[in-house]
Structures are given as C-alpha cells and as structure tokens.
Amino acid sequence: MGIMMFRKLLTIFFVTFIFGLTLAEEPNEVYPFEDSIHEERFQSLLNELRCPKCQGSNLAGSNAPIAIDLKREVYRLVKLGKTEKEVKTYLVDRYGNFIVYDPPFESDTYALWLAPLIIFLITFSVILFRRFSN
Amino acid sequence: MKNLLNLLPLIAFVILIAVLYSFLTQDNDQLESVLVDQSVPEFRLPSLENPEIAISKSNINKLPAVINVWATWCIACKVEHPFLMKLKEESIVTVYGLNYKDNRTKALDLLKKDGNPFELSIFDEYGKLAIDLGVYGAPETFFIDKKGIIRERHVGVLTTKVWKEKFERFLNGDNDV
C-alpha cells in the first residue's frame, strides 16, 4: 500500500470521524422561541436540571426518552411565561431535590452542604495541632 | 498522641472506604419519592383499548390498587408480567396499567398473548401522567391505598420479595397516616 493510499485512508477516516461528531451533537428536537428572554431561560434551565435516568448529565446533554419528555415539559412551561423558579418547583414537586443541581438547604441536604466545611475544619485543626505540638 | 495523629489519614481513609462500600450494595436506582403520601394526580388520558374513551383519576376507584408503569420496549416489564398476573388472579389487589411511551398495537398484542392483568389500561403516549408521577423509567409501580393516597413506589421489577418488603403492609390499611 503506497503512502498516497495511506493518506487517502487517513483523510477518509478523519472526515468520517469529524462528520460523525457533528451528527452526534445535532439536537433531536428544535424548540423555537419568539421571545429571547424565554429562550435564554429555557437554555439555562436545561443546564441546571438533571436527567433523572442518566444520573451523570443534565437535561441539555441527554437524549434519553425521559430527558426529551422533560425538555418538552420545560419548553411548555417557559412558553407559558413561568419563571425559572416556578419551573424548578414544578419539577422538584415531581422528581424531588435530585433534579436540581443546587438543592435547597434543608434537613435532607444538611450533610451535602455542610460536609465540605466540616472536612475543611478537621483538616485545618489537624494542621494547626501538628504545628503547635512540634 | 502523635502516633495517633499520624494514623489519622489512614483512619479517615478506612472510614471513607467503609462508607463507599456500604453505598455499593445500596439500590441507587431508587430516587426519593416525592409523591409518597400524596393523592394520585389528576389526569385525563385515553384508554389503551379504545382511543375514544378517556380515563381520569375518578376511574381509579377499586382500591387498594397498584398503578404499574410498563411498555413493550421494556424488557424488565416482561419479567414482572407473571407477577402482575398473579396479583390479578389471586385478587390480591387491583392492578391499573399505565402504558408508557409505547405503541398501541404492540401493547395490545402483548396483552392478548401474555394475558391482561390490568383492570384499566391508560395510554400515556407522551409520558404526561408519568411526569406527574415522577416516573423516570419502566417498570415502576405505585401502591394506592383505600383512600386514594400513594403509599409506596418501587422502581424496577416487582417480585414476591419486593411485594413482601415494601407493599404488603399497606394492604389492610392499618398504616394510616
């Protein structure tokens, strides 16, 4: 196989690869808005809401059937003129605090919010203790 | 004392491993259920058998009951199907079906072939009622007590074991709020 052939193959490979990537990024559904404030609100909600099925990603980054349904629901609510807070409350009422990336500070989530602070305090006091006991 | 301090990172590490290990065996598919102890949400959706007939909350009236979220594309639903048949045949509880994001013909074919455990079948093509119930996959099963209150929810295959552990105690309605 000549070097030209190899180059050709390589080009074909990369072109397919890059083309494949753009296809993968293509959104499955289009959500048209007349109002740009609504559009921004919709986009920011998709980034801040979690997909309940694929627990590692947000709604924007997921095409799981449930994520598509929830996107459609968020779209509907935003078009109705609901505020960001109202949409979040609507989903938290159904899916729980899990669905938002910044859960409220309440009894269920104390550990979540306070753990970093406690770990920091422990580390800090250990360091101090070692400094002074030397 | 100083030795103990030097051991601190090791102790912290062991605790961390223990905590993480305990999470391993936990069923982390089960998200918190906001709807437990709430009434069944209002809805109006067509019946699976006949698109002309609408089913609403008032039709869920043979209580206690379970609402089972299923679909023909869901393999685990096939696995739990015999258990739902058993619930019906032994008249343990009324079973209502919520056919979730499915194909009507396929769903009806399956019920004809494998048996129909459902008192009523709701056809939720776009997952509307499913969103109101906080459903994120199939199968999911909700226990509705005599007063129409959701008392328990299970995500995943319903088995005799799950039934005994999670659902059975609500049958007699003596766990009133």
Image (cartoon, coloured by chain):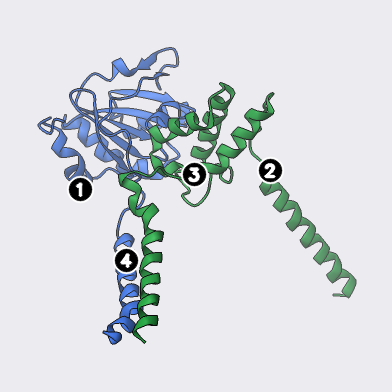
Chain colours: A green, B blue
Percent position (x, y) of residue B124?
44, 26
Q: Chain of mark 3?
A: A
Give neighbour class at mark 3: few <14, some 14-19, many 20+ (Cα, 10 Å): many
Classify mark 3: helix, strand or loop.
Answer: loop
To the question of a shared chain for discs 2 and 3, the answer is: yes
Distance between the alpha carbons at the discs numbered 1 and 4: 24 Å
Q: Amino acid at mark 4?
A: Tyr
Tag 4 and tag 3, C-beta contact below 8 Å: no
Nearest to viewer (mark 4 / mark 2): 4
Percent position (x, y) of residue A60?
58, 42
Q: Residue beneath label 1, please?
A: B161
First in sequence, mark 2 or 3: give its number.
Answer: 2
Q: Residue beneath label 3, please?
A: A50
Left or right? Give the position of B168 relative to A130: left
Distance between the alpha carbons at the discs numbered 4 and 2: 39 Å
Q: Residue beneath label 4, please?
A: B21
Q: Residue beneath label 2, please?
A: A26
Q: Chain of mark 4?
A: B
Query: Quarter-wise, where is residue B99 in the image?
Result: top left
Give neighbour class at mark 1: few <14, some 14-19, many 20+ (Cα, 10 Å): few
Classify mark 2: helix, strand or loop.
Answer: loop
Nearest to viewer (mark 1 / mark 2): 2
Classify mark 4: helix, strand or loop.
Answer: helix
